[in-house]
């Protein structure tokens, strides 16, 4: 086991990883992104001989244009929100570790699309790092996301013949610094709105079959939500936990967010606040699906207003929370981080 002094002497490469986005809000750009994403067995756990003909003949013919139209609604001048905000985190974390006088180089890679994880790892090796800390920007661990990052890192390291020691921060769903940051965002939203509405805690869903295979994601989501509402001092009547973004016809984690919103409207809730603690940064699933799509759904069901609480993005509370995790890893502390 390396000593604290030995680890401090090493130049560390911090590799931030997010899922990724297409390069442009066009069908031409979305198609290769979707092909890469939906060809990953971590994402769609079906035999290739069965799945690939469906993907190529049906999904990749119809879905790119529909997805491109959705991306256009939220696209920023600088690019896809997920990419823009992830880069902002990279920049801010580099400034944070510099201020802490840590010998650490921060790079950003995506599991799918650009910048590729391989290009980010190449930059770290060129910078002369001696070990890598891999930080997927997914607060909860899932085989569909975090394990996919591990797979992609393994392929990148193999392709670059990189044999640097690597340590994974597999999740931070219950870290006190992260829960504090989420609670602070809710309280800031309520101060701005000057009222406290029913809080909907919506996580990205995964297939129910994935949970049954032992994936810890569902339980970690529930744990995050429990710690958050405890920090906020909410009662059971003050909040709901649900899951969004289901795809296909199989059963996904429940209750579903759209069904929950319908029930809340029928129960007489005129306003709801929605936070998505499974997303480190805002993206298509939060800015379009929640802030636009679910807001329309809630109104159609009889509600008056859905108020989306933005992801932590590059806010200082998020940078401080992630920085705390990184400092412990770069400092060489072993064991669980709590």
Image: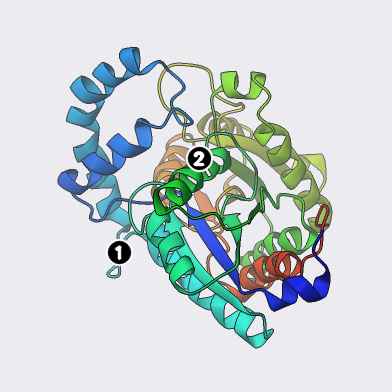
Q: Which residue is mark 1?
A: 79
Residue that label 2 marks: 151
Image-quadrant location for residue 160: bottom left
Q: Residue at x 43, y 49 (%)?
A: 156
At label 2, counting other C-alpha atoms closer than 10 Å, the crowd grade (few under 14, some 14-19, many 20 or more) is some
x, y percentage for residue 80? 33, 59
Q: Quadrant of the C terminus?
A: bottom right
The CA distance from mark 1 to mark 2 is: 26 Å
Q: Residue at x 29, y 21 (%)?
A: 52
Which of these two is toward me, 245 or 215? Answer: 215
Residue 255 seen in the figure: yes
Q: Is residue 49 left or right of residue 178?
A: left
Closer-to-camera residue (132/40): 132
- Residue 125 placed where, x, y %? 47, 66
Residue 36 picture quarter: top left
Mark 1 is surrounded, within 10 Å at the Cα level, by few (under 14), some (14 to 19) or many (20 or more) other residues, namely some
Tell me the element at label 1: loop
Q: Is residue 20 left or right of residue 59?
A: right
| Percent coordinates x, y for residue 173 in the rendering | 71, 49
């Amino acid at each position: 086991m390396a000593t604290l002094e030995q680890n401090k002497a090493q130049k560390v490469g911090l590799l931030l990883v997010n899922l990724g986005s297409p390069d442009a809000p066009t069908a031409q750009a979305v198609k290769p992104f979707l092909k890469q994403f939906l060809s990953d067995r971590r994402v769609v756990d079906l035999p290739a001989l069965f799945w690939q003909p469906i993907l190529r003949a049906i999904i990749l013919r119809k879905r790119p244009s529909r997805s491109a139209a959705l991306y256009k609604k939220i696209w920023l001048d600088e690019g896809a929100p997920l990419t823009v905000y992830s880069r902002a985190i990279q920049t801010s974390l580099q400034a944070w570790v510099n201020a802490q006088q840590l010998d650490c180089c921060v790079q950003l890679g995506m599991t799918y699309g650009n910048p590729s994880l391989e290009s980010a790892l190449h930059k770290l090796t060129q910078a002369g790092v001696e070990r890598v800390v891999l930080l997927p920007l997914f607060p909860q661990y899932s085989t569909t996301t975090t394990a996919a990052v591990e797979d992609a890192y393994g392929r990148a390291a193999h392709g670059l013949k990189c044999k640097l020691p690597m340590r994974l921060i597999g999740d931070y769903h219950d870290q006190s610094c992260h829960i504090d940051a989420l609670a602070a965002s809710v309280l800031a939203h309520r101060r701005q709105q000057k009222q406290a509405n029913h809080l909907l805690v919506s996580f990205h869903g995964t297939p129910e079959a994935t949970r049954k295979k032992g994936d810890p994601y569902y339980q970690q989501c529930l744990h995050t939500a429990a710690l958050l509402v405890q920090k906020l001092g909410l009662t059971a009547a003050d909040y709901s936990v649900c899951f969004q973004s289901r795809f296909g016809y199989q059963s996904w984690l429940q209750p579903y967010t759209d069904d929950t919103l319908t029930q809340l409207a029928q129960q007489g809730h005129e306003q709801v606040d929605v936070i998505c603690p499974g997303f480190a940064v805002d993206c298509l699933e939060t800015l379009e699906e929640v802030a636009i799509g679910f807001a329309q759904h809630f109104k159609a069901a009889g509600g008056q207003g859905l108020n989306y609480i933005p992801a932590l993005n590059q806010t200082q509370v998020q940078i401080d929370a992630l920085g705390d995790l990184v400092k412990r890893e770069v400092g060489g502390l072993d064991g669980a981080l709590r």
